[in-house]
Image (cartoon, rainbow, N blue to C red):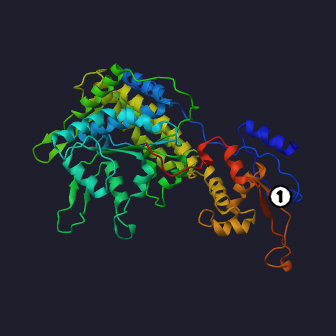
Amino acid sequence: MSDAKQELAKSLLRGKSPRPSGKPAEAPAADQPWEEPIPLPGLPAVDPFPLQALPEPLRAYVEEVAASTNTPPDYAATFALAVAAGCVGATRAVTIKEGHVQRSSLYVCAVAPKGSGKSPALDAVVEPLFEEQARIRASGDKKRKAFVADVTAEKLAELMMENVRGVLMVRDELASWMAGFNQYKAGGKGNDRHFYLSAWSGSAVQVDRKNKEAEPIFVRYPCLTVVGTIQPSVLDRFKADADDGFYDRVLFCIPDELPLVGERWRTIDPTTARSWADAVCWLRSLAMHEDPANGPRPYFLHLEDGAKLAWEGWTNDVAHQCNAPDADPIMRGPTVKLAGYAARLALVSNMLSKAFEEKSRNGTTIDAQDMRRGVTLGVYFLSHAQRAWAAAGIDASHGPLRKLVKWIEQTGVKRFTRRDAHRMLHRSFPTSDALTAPLGTLVQHGFLRYAREQESPQGPATGRPTVAYEVHPEFCQRVNSVNASPHFERGPESESR
């Protein structure tokens, strides 16, 4: 290994990547062999799931699901939070202060490649609702739903109007959910995204029907929870092109993968599974407050003094993080949303504790323990949001590099200039200078190298040579094999259960 490569490897071990030089090194001869590439910067580290934030019976169930499916406990724990939130629905809300109310609406997405076991973990956690759905169908009730799956926004609004206590959507593949937005509207234009934004915030929603003569659908207290999975290879499509903050509202779970193992004959203890099923049943039995004047509305839980102090400290920490000089401005949106999510997670924690009889089921407040659990979960999901945004190529550091790598992979280009890259990627790189850092990184890591200088297309009169980049002949294979992270992973766009 050359001295330059050895120095680069040392810097990577120190957790740093050298800044790209503005001046290219001397180009090698065309027949000079390539050195082994050095792995590209990996994804940010993430926190392990804080199991202490769950009631003890649920913690035991999560650990058994994780062991039986050979998955990180993050999946089962995150799915359980979403199922609990969906079961609570619009029956409860937490009042932070006058005019600031948070509801138990979560949009949860587990990120993992195919064969990771995330779907079996999801099935295990949702199993009590599968059983309830079967009982509802057997009874002939066509309106009541334990959960929904593949429905349009208009149909979902109808279901929310019929099921005023809220709706839980379970989608094994959330990429198809996003792809279905507005698919039934002329030209693919509609307000599906706005509908899901309103449902998340708890604002009243109104949806016009396809039948113009029918009355619009109106839901006064919408409460929708969505839970599902997605593969890293299509995570960037989750954001689409809209910059409306939808992506900011998603709670991502993207833990380190476990190595594959053979059959270990681990199963979920029936007693532990029944404890979870009973808790789900109790949460599903919660009723709304009947307002004689305006109909059903949530019961509002207020913060105790200890909870107020925990909330104040958490929001101050979030503000400090967003205002820090080195803060990534792209992460401001999800960070701010996670501030509010802590209150929602505190509400879910409160209701789970009551479901497992850790506290009085008649309480009307959020205490300090509830809020501390919500904050702990908020910190966890913030670290996973940072990794998910990096994996999707949205953050400031990984995003440009990922876009350049994808362009090289998709085009199969063998040699190009900065001008060539800018002409094809001008939407992602407004100026050619914006390509300096990602090009320099690929050169330093051995995936590109400077080619012999060539005459400028503007002619010899300018006297300015143009630097060309030569692409490693096995770029696609190498960029995937030396990077053991989902950041540059490729794979099918869907998977079966």
Tell whether 205 sits left or right of 380: left
The quadrant holding residue 284 is: top left
Tell whether 50 sits left or right of 282: right
In the image, residue 254 above or below residue 329: above
Tell whether 250 sits left or right of 105: right
The quadrant holding residue 260 is: top right
Q: Where residue 490 sits: x, y (%)? A: 59, 50
Name which residue lies at 33% across and 33% down.
Answer: 127
In the image, residue 125 above or below residue 386: above
Name which residue lies at 37% across and 62% down.
Answer: 182
Q: Where residue 27 sits: x, y (%)? A: 87, 59
- Residue highlighted by disc 1: 24
User: Toward the viewer: 154 or 8?
Assistant: 154
In the image, residue 461 above or below residue 229: below
Quadrant where the C terminus is found in the figure: top left
Quadrant where the N terminus is found in the figure: top right
Q: Residue furthest left?
A: 292
User: Toward the viewer: 300 or 435?
Assistant: 435
The answer to whether residue 455 shows anywhere in this view is yes
User: Toward the viewer: 444 or 257?
Assistant: 257
User: Toward the viewer: 131 or 3?
Assistant: 131
The quadrant holding residue 85 is: top left
Q: Where residue 267 sits: x, y (%)? A: 43, 23
Is label 1 in a helix, a strand or a loop?
A: loop
Q: Residues within 10 Å of mark 1 (few under 14, many from 20)?
A: some
Name which residue lies at 70% across and 46% down.
Answer: 40
Amino acid on which disc 1 is placed: Pro
Q: Where residue 270 sits: x, y (%)? A: 34, 21
Tell whether 109 sits left or right of 290: right
The answer to whether residue 220 shows anywhere in this view is no
